[in-house]
Amino acid sequence: MPEDKQIQLLTTRLKKLGGHILSIRLMFGLMLLIALAAISVFVATAVHGLFYLPVWFRTAFDILVGISAFALMIWFIFRPLILRPRVETLSLLVERKHPGLKNRMIAALQLEKELLQNKQNYSQVLIRQCIQQAEQLSREIDFKSSYRHPHLKTGLRLTAISVVAAVAMLVLLPGLFSSSWQVFSDPLTEIPRELTYDLVVEPQSVDVLKFDDLKVSAYVFGHKLPEDAKIFWKVAEKWRENEFKQGNEASEYPELQSANLKTISDTLIFDYTFEEIRHDFEYFVEVGDLRSPMYKVAVVDKPRINNIKLSYFYPEYTRLSPVVIDENDGTVQALKGTEVKLEALANKPVAEAEVVFENGSSQKLKVDSNQLSGTFPVDRDGSYHISVVDAIGHRNPDPIEYRIMMMEDLPPSIRIVKPGGNIDLDDYLAFDLHASLSDDFGFSKLVLHYTIHLSALEHHQDSTIFRIDQNKSDQLIEYFWDLSNKGLYPGSYVDYYFEVFDNDYISGPKSAVSRTYTARHPTINEMFTEIEEAREEMISDMIEALRTEQKIKEAVEKLHEDLQFSDEIDWETKQDIQKTQAEQEELIKKFEEVSKDFKKLNEQAKKQDLLSLEMIQKLNELQKLFDQVATPEMKDAMRKLAEAMEKMDKNELERAMKEFEMSSEEMLENIERSIAQLKRFQVEQKMQAMVAMAEKMLENQEGINADVSQAQKEQLSKIKPRQDTNKDEFERLKEHSKELEKMLEENQMQNDQSAGSFCQAVNDNQADVPMEKASQAMSQKDQEQSAQQGGQASMDLEKLVDQMKNAQSQFSNQMSAEMVQKMRDAVDQLLYLSDEQEQLYNEIEPLRPLSGSMNELAQKQQNLTSETERIRNELVDMAKQSAFMQSAIDDFMERALSSMRSSVEAMSNSNQRSAASYQNEGIYSLNRSAQTLIQSLNNQSQCNSSCNKNQSMFTKMKKMSQSQSKVNRQTQNMCNNPGNNMGKPSAEQLRRLAAEQSQIGRGIQEMVDEFGNRKDALGRLDKMSGEIREVVEALEKGETGPQLMARQKKIYSRMLDFQLSLERRDYSEQRKADTGQDVVRESPDELDLKGNLSESEYRAKLEKYMQETYPPEYENLVKDYFKALMQSDNR
Amino acid sequence: MERFIVVITCLCCVLLCMSDLSGAEDTPSSLQIARLKYFGGGDWYWGPSALPNLIEFVDRNTPLQIAPEEVRLTLTDEKLFHYPFLYLTGHGPVRFSVEEEERLALYLTAGGFLFANDSYGLRKSFMEEMEQVFPDTEPVELPFSHGIFNCYYNFPNGLPKIHEHDKKPPQAYGWFVDGRLVALLAYESDIGDGWEDPSVHKDSPEKRQAALKMGANILTWVLLN
């Protein structure tokens, strides 16, 4: 083996020895550390178990243990690691143990370095030899046995003992060990000295509600308990203290159990109560040597609601805008279905909030810090409150309970305002139907329900739905209801009512119905009978009034007589006068009522086409008479009587009584005259109505005939009721004829030939026979026979109508002619009397007083007076027969008679001058009577002639106006009425209306052609015609709207005015034009026809025009013209 | 505007000539007076017996030949140009539409004549309308020396006073186009009423005669100028 190998082997073996030594040393160091730890644990536990260990001790102990451990680690672990023995040292250690090596090994290690360098010039061989010897000598030696640690066994023993002791301590006293570990692991923490008692404070740190009380309890338990306790607290940086008060027995404090305290019999409890805490504070409790930790009491507010705001979101159908209730009042008062948005502000941030209703249900509110919000619906009456809980679980105490008052949507209401009652339909079978609807929030539907009663057995129901403005809560529906296509005939009727539904979609639409009314298609007979009966009743009332007035007159006469023979007015007389006066006033009022009723009745008759133009004019005159029954003189007399009664002046009262008496007489005459004229008028009215009935029957019969010809056999039974109705009407006509005969007799006209012919025509007519047969044929479904008999009935009726009209016309003309003749005769007689009176006046005027011929002349005057009285009576009779006789005639005749009587008396007294004067007055009064009578005569004549002349115009215009009224209402209905077409009318409807309007226009134009030569008619007709054209154009263009309706209304007004002027005979009134007086004045200045244009200016203008450009097609023409002008100007 | 009227006038003349040449069948064979129907509220139909009486008077007392019946037409009537003499009367306001104003301007400048009789209350509106018809032409009050007052009968004091209106003297206002009298308004005279039947206004024969004579003068002047 080479030397280097040998030396390397030797070195390796020595290094291994070095490693062995290091491991032993490290193990020893580790054992020492373990022993130190075990001893420390043991000591610490033991010390902790035996003594109270203050901080310093524990700290010092911990430091000491730490330093020891550190030192051990440095010396026994790090030092061997760092200071490892060199190879030579190890070699010496081995050679010291094994002296047989004889230092060869150390020598080999030292010489081996010289082997390479050999600075000392040692023998290489020797060196090698030495190395070989060293290797050989050490080959058998265990180097590891060369080292023994001197304290290893001691260390091991110490470690084992200490570990065993520590483990034993751990096993035997684990609590102590644990406690010891805690104590020594945290040496700086003070360890409470173990006392014989302990202290628990409740509630320690706590949040307390502001103004709440806080009871702090200190529980002291153990042995040798102290007797005193103190509580210290700091408020506003200042400490305060107070003695604790000893509390009750521990058993009374259940919290003791919950606090998991040791139940030791010897326990003290100390209480202290902080009252109405307002601020935060800290406190601790001191009991004997014990002091509790510092606790903190935080004052917190209770949550509460400071502000509440409600917003109502009403149901959509109400269209009400949301409403915010700002009053900070949570009371809910809203319509059912309203969504209430609740917004509230709490005094502090809250964790949760809810609305709690009276029935216990609740609804969470959204919480954002202290802001709460949420919604809930109003669906019943009730109440709610807001409950909030703050972050620490406090709930708002005693929340306010707010009421919820649910308002119900009210049901709608509907009322038919027009016609507002049962009505009779006119010929057009159409009428205005206006309904007033109201609801709190609008409507959803309007339905017109109606039942058409065609006969007692046949009726059918139907309804029309109106689309109305659902958003308007109050509205008036104006509907023009045209029933002409509903198959109504005289005698049938329609029951109808409206039903309206509101738009309450929350509880469901509620409905209301109007009253049910009837629209009847009356027969002429019914219409006439109604009017006739009303007039009869009126006549009865007037006869009663006449009797009353007679009694009043008698009473007045008696009172007047009594008054004349008494010196003063006694109480009874006064009472009687007042009573009479009251009766008279009542009678006047009654008559005013009668006059109003009369007017209404006439309007009704006019509307129902029961009056001819002549009759209307007569009625107008009669109306004037009615209005004048209570004369102004009567009213004046009553006023004077009242004044005299007040003054109690006998003379004045006598005068007033006299005037009253005279007025009463006059009123009596007026009443008598009114009754007489009304009775006569009833005859004419009856005739007119009978003619109208016959015409209507004819029209109905023709309608029936037409329907029969077009109907199937099975349908004939449906026509039968109409035929029966017509037959019934005919029978009633005959009854009217009988009644007419009686009336003629009552009015002493029974001998009138034309009236007789009139009745005879009705009585002889046998139209009822074919009508009856036709009816039977209809029952048997015999169409041919029905048509045949119907045709016969038509012919009979046609004949009847002609006969009646002729007789009526003759009767009317004859009556008028007789009256005119009577008036003329009366005028002649009055003029004759006036002449005679004048002659008498001329005879008496030159006579001397007390002349002998005075008596003779007085006799003549007496004769004249008697004659005048006779004529006056005749005139009174005439006044009862003619409505055109002016009441002024009677006044003048009275005055004339009075003057003439006075003249006779004056003559008897030979008072020639006075007689002449009275005669003069008599002449004047007679002349005025004649003059007034002539006016009456003219009126009577004009009525006859103009009525004949204007009847046709009147009738046509009446029909036109009725048509126009219908068109107007249709237009209005179409434009305004939501009925069948909401919004704009359709083009078809407009075309139809335009056609109807155009038809009226053609009718007016025909009237223009027919009556255009009459100055009273042309202007009006022409204006109507022009306006109708405009309306037609507007309708054709679809220009509907208020303007169109206004135009139509204007046309209708013109038509009515036209009729009215014919009725009142005011068309002949002329525009007043006074003849002008010639005026002489200076002539205006002479003309300067060239104006201010000089010739040069004129030429300049022409040249300028020549330069202008004109449309190409005219340019040459125009310029040629200007050239021609310039040339002519040159010439 | 002047230029426009001149142009329109020329065109109308041409058109009128052409229509004359074409010999329209509807053209009346003799002079016929037309009553102008107007709107505005006035009673254009006032005095239905006036024109027949005037025509009868003229026929009897002058060499003029006038058709016995009056024609009634509006300014928009297509036959307007067939009648050279228009008679307008009434009590109320007169209103022309724009179309009517243009037609009247055309008619008057083309040779037509308009006689307006203020029966009462017509003057103001008529003046306003004529201002629209001839914006550049002011009405002038005719002096007594004007030919219209002496062309057949002599009226040395101008228009006769037939009816009393506002206690003012009668005045004749004329509108001239190119020196020709195209329109005449009789104010505070009411000769139209004077032409009516005696029973209508109960005028004295002298007044009626004066009115008719003045009417004859107007017709004569118009036809001769």
Image (cartoon, coloured by chain):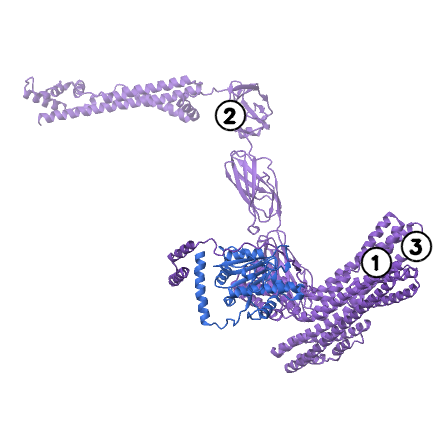
Q: Nearer the viewer, mark 3 or mark 2?
A: 3
Q: Mark 1 lies on which chain?
A: A
**Towards the viewer: A349 or A870:** A870
Query: Which quadrant of the view contains residue A64?
Result: top left
Q: How far apart are marks 1 and 2 (CA)?
A: 115 Å
Chain A tint in image: purple
**Towards the viewer: A234 or A1097:** A1097
Q: Who's the residue at 45% across and 71% down the image?
A: B22
Quadrant containing the C terminus of chain A is: bottom left
Q: Where is residue B51 in the image (x, y as percent from the top left)?
A: 59, 67
Quickly name the residue at label 1: A663
**Disc 2 residue type (three-letter):** Lys
The answer to whether B109 appears left or right of B70 in the picture is left
Q: Where is residue B87 in the image (x, y as percent from the top left)?
A: 56, 64
Q: Share a chain, discs 1 and 2?
A: yes
Quickly name the residue at label 2: A296
**Chain letter for blue?**
B
Question: Is residue A610 placed above or below B1 in the rendered structure?
Answer: below
